Amino acid sequence: MSEFEFITRITKRLSRTANDRRDARGEVAEKASADFVDIGPGDDAAVIRAPGGRVVATSDLLIEGRHFRRDWSGPYDVGRKAAAQNLADVVAMGARPTALLIGFGVPAETEPGRAAPEWAQREWAEWLYDGLRDECDLVGAVVAGGDVVRAPMVILAVTALGDLAGRAPLLRSGARTGDVVAVRGRLGFAAAGVDLLSRGRDGPAILVEAHRRPRPPYAAGDEAARLGATALIDVSDGLVQDLGHIAAASGVRIDLDDAALPIAAELGAAGRTLVLTGGDDHAFAGTFPRETALPETWCAIGHVVAGEGVTIDGRPHGLTGWDHFRQ
Amino acid sequence: MSEFEFITRITKRLSRTANDRRDARGEVAEKASADFVDIGPGDDAAVIRAPGGRVVATSDLLIEGRHFRRDWSGPYDVGRKAAAQNLADVVAMGARPTALLIGFGVPAETEPGRAAPEWAQREWAEWLYDGLRDECDLVGAVVAGGDVVRAPMVILAVTALGDLAGRAPLLRSGARTGDVVAVRGRLGFAAAGVDLLSRGRDGPAILVEAHRRPRPPYAAGDEAARLGATALIDVSDGLVQDLGHIAAASGVRIDLDDAALPIAAELGAAGRTLVLTGGDDHAFAGTFPRETALPETWCAIGHVVAGEGVTIDGRPHGLTGWDHFRQ
């Protein structure tokens, strides 16, 4: 198969019908997307609308063996997750995701654990793009372009773009003393899932699936902006580490209330540590003016005080988060 | 070194002084850039201005051993080239490049052929970012964000963004029967350089350097738009192949005039083939209304006629271009 045949094949996965927009959970995206893409795949570059006059842009590099494993996750889930983690970064800026660009490194060898002919590898790629498309559909974004190259392992370079609709971005640097710290979304589930898979277990499903396919609560960005959030971050490297980024950028200390942490029963005995340090759930953590009436979707977990770093009940936490270079 | 120390170190390379804007050729960028970047590295995403209300976006994935070799190119040149090939795609849309996002896969092992301590690897990365910065300076763009991860080889995922300033994009699909086909920039030099390096030779310098550091004539995009170009493409996969993309997208045939091809004497006996099939010089090929008064910077090489594909003096050319899957 030539490069151009391959591109034609995966680009077809991105065409959309009402059925396409129904994802594996049976959910249907609220609105047709493609609204923001003037020129999609097939030219030197894509052209995407930025009606607010500014574009939010983020990119992640995902490498097989480090960020995902083909024996732990199928291609559809790899696609969902790769899109989700970048869409979450756009949402954490208070923006609406509009488009993804996908750089896809495609290994020539067949799938591990299978004596697969060429068609199986082709299907792997098609399922991947189905996953990318369906995750995008949840927020009304589309895959607008990218690049396909041969590589010794699966490599995904995902760029997500978004529109602020004229609003100011929600930065890490806006937290003020007196603000309430709150989180929306699951914490610790994905880390618990990785731990199970690394011990050869494939359940409980709620934890393993949380690793395979995070469910960022995408509405959190709009909601936080409406509520007047002073800072917002996508929790990807662990709660204390990511709140530490807000504390550092804002020149404040964040003090968590140990008793208020949302520790789900499913996480078991290690729940507290998983909630504080587990990454990849893509919850959103924000700071809000003290007087904010937070809806039930947000869980208040602490306050912004003078100082630096992150403490729990006023004391150092002694925990470390994710370091992409060490782990 | 932790991920965050590493990011701090490379981000420093992107800070700019008048001196920074003087590149290795002694050229100084016409104007300070950073104009377009509201929020640079350090938050969940970058925020880049798109005053024209649309953003041009393209991305390429470069993998060590396939797209560059560390024993053939130093880190500064790898950075220049990685930036250049993406900036050229933005220019080929008739847009002004504004920002790059860089996904950087960093191998833990030291440089090949050297018993290098950790500092040498750090320097490799710093030189790389110097190259990215200096190429961006030529067009007034900046590196606005990205991602750093451990990888088994150097991987660069480059996304380039650009602004159309309210103009329509220059697409591949606009060529019309009767148009003149013209090219601006060098052809065949980079391919000749790769051929020399693969035979263990390190000269002539003009050819080898053309592979290491292409010099796209970035002014070609603005110029083509002003001249009323009907289509424009970045010549990255070889002239006949890339003109074939214009022919296919426009539903026309492109007939090249063999005697008009710009075959530089430096290319030697294989000059004609190198000009017709060599990639990676990042010249620009466009189609222009017949009455266009082309400036000397553009070389007229053929015409748009009815039909399909690319011919030379009316006959099939029998040449093949670059396939990223085969080669």
Image: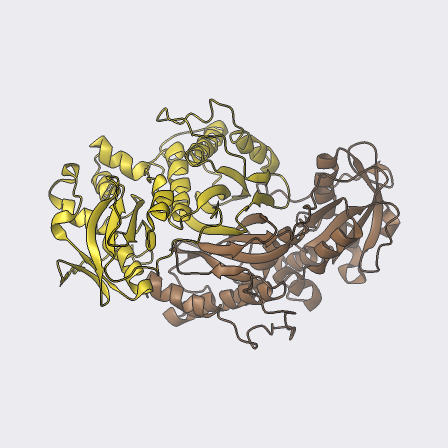
Chain colours: A yellow, B brown
Residue at the front extreme of this rendering: A291
- State the quadrant of the C terminus of chain B: top right
Residue B80: image location, x then y, percent: 58, 63
Nearest the eye: A144 or B121: A144
A230 lies left or right of B257: left
Report whether residue B239 is seen. Answer: yes
A6 lies left or right of A131: right
Is residue B307 shown above or below B98? above
Residue A29: image location, x then y, percent: 42, 29
Q: Residue at x 65, y 65 (%)?
A: B209
Could you tell me how many numbered marks the image carries? Answer: 0
Report whether residue B72 is seen. Answer: no
Residue at the bottom extreme of this rendering: B19
Residue A177: image location, x then y, percent: 25, 62
Nearest the eye: A287 or B265: A287
- State the quadrant of the N terminus of chain B: bottom left
- Residue B178, picture quadrant: top right
Residue A1: image location, x then y, percent: 57, 33
- Residue B306, picture quadrant: top right
Q: Residue at x 14, y 45 (%)?
A: A270
A284 lies left or right of B271: left
B300 lies left or right of A65: right
